[in-house]
Image (cartoon, rainbow, N blue to C red):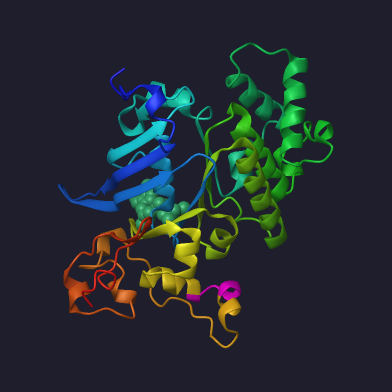
Amino acid sequence: MNNVNPKPAATTPQQPLLTIEDLSLSFETSQKGVVLEALQKVALVVNASQTVCIVGESGCGKSLTSLAIMGLTPTNALKPTGTVWFQTKDNKRVELLSLPERELRKLRGREIAMIFQDPMTSLNPAFTVEFQLCEAIQTHSNVKLSKTQLREKAIAALDAVGIPAPADRLKAYPFQLSGGMSQRVMIAIALAGDPKILIADEPTTALDVTIQAQILTLLKNLQTSRKMGLILITHDLGVVAEMADFVNVMYAGQIVESGSAADVLHNPRHPYTQALLNSLPALQMTKTNERRLESIPGVVPHLAARPSGCQFHPRCLYKTTVCVAGHPALKAISNDHAARCFKTEGKL
Ligand SMILES: Nc1ncnc2c1ncn2[C@@H]1O[C@H](COP(=O)(O)OP(=O)(O)O)[C@@H](O)[C@H]1O
Ligand SMILES: [Mg+2]
């Protein structure tokens, strides 16, 4: 297969699970030859047993990044460019963007699975939990399972995601479940194929605060016990502080800062990351109770109205003429910490 790296397996145990390089995605417009760039050369890495957060305000390109990994970008988008290398369970290195749909379909669920923000709309309202969960379990099983075997596995799967009285819950329809319970069912369905990576796109945004914490704890426990990679998408740096090993901050379709959770949260170098942190009550309280909560003035630019130069400059406290004209590169600050700002380049 031409998508498989020829290197022998023995030399690749340290390979990351997923390596995204130069991922760009555009939408066509009604004007011939004019495209809107939604993702610009996104790069990120996910290692085994690692929680990698993608954080940024709404419209920054977080969901499109995860959909590109799954080969599920919107139909009105142009084909994504760049590379997404993935290390399969049998230690093959495949490039997902060039993989035919038929091959990608085999990987979805078994190698990479995804859960979304609103569990209520992801579950089919017309079928019971048992039907939907058993269907996922059978799809990912190599052998035909009997009804009893499927039921036993379904009960175990619900138990593993912390659903009490799982045998009774099997009979429920989605509308009979709370938001938190529905999300647990979605997680059980997503894990039915024992994936190496779970992508969770704002999995707790639609839930009450106490339920959010329970679902995050569940995800963390499942990630640790299954040694999965977890890509957690959120607009909330509080969630990042709870969960992340590694953080990618996105703004206007670009990664603007990346680093370990400790680096990004305690030594943020991009003014956007700093502004996100300043708008977060709990984290800044630990520094000083006197600092005011600041929301970030302005909004994420519309794709059709991107500013010149640094995409963040219209909202940036430190902008100079350099920022209006030039495009800062993602520059390394230390080993695995980088930021896209002229300030880190020493040009301001
Ligand atoms: N199907 C689409 N057609 C046109 N523009 C889209 C489509 N989907 C997303 N976009 C645009 O791409 C940008 C990134 O979207 P998205 O990845 O959903 O952001 P996020 O998940 O960070 O909120 C936004 O400006 C959004 O309006
Ligand atoms: Mg989104």
Would residue 277 be found to the left or right of residue 142 on screen?
Answer: left
Residue 280 falls inside the magenta stretch: yes
The relative height of residue 206 versus residue 187 in the rendered view (above or below) is below
Quarter of the figure with the C terminus: bottom left
User: What secondary structure characterizes most of the magenta part?
Assistant: helix
State the image coordinates of residue 37 (x, y, percent, origin top left). 26, 52
Residue 1, magenta (yes or no)? no
Residue 309 quadrant: bottom left
- Is residue 2 in view? yes
Instruction: State whether residue 219 is above or below residue 55.
Output: above
Residue found at x 45% / y 63%: 263
Seen as rendered, the residue at the extreme bottom is 290
Name which quarter of the figure residue 267 lies in: bottom left
What residue sits 55% from the left and 77% below the top? 284
Counting from the top left corner in percent of width and height, residue 302 is at 32, 62
Instruction: Return the x and y of residue 282 as percentages of the image width and height.
Output: 61, 73
Number of marks drawn: 0
Q: Is residue 265 left or right of residue 317?
A: right
Residue 191 screen position, x and y as percent: 61, 33
Instruction: Return the residue nearer the eye: 65 or 117.
Output: 65
Specify whether 46 is left or right of 85: right
Residue at position x 82%, y 31% in the image? 167
Viewer-nearest residue: 78 or 331: 331
Residue range in magenta is 278-283
Question: Which residue is outermost to the front?
Answer: 11
Observer able to see residue 72: no
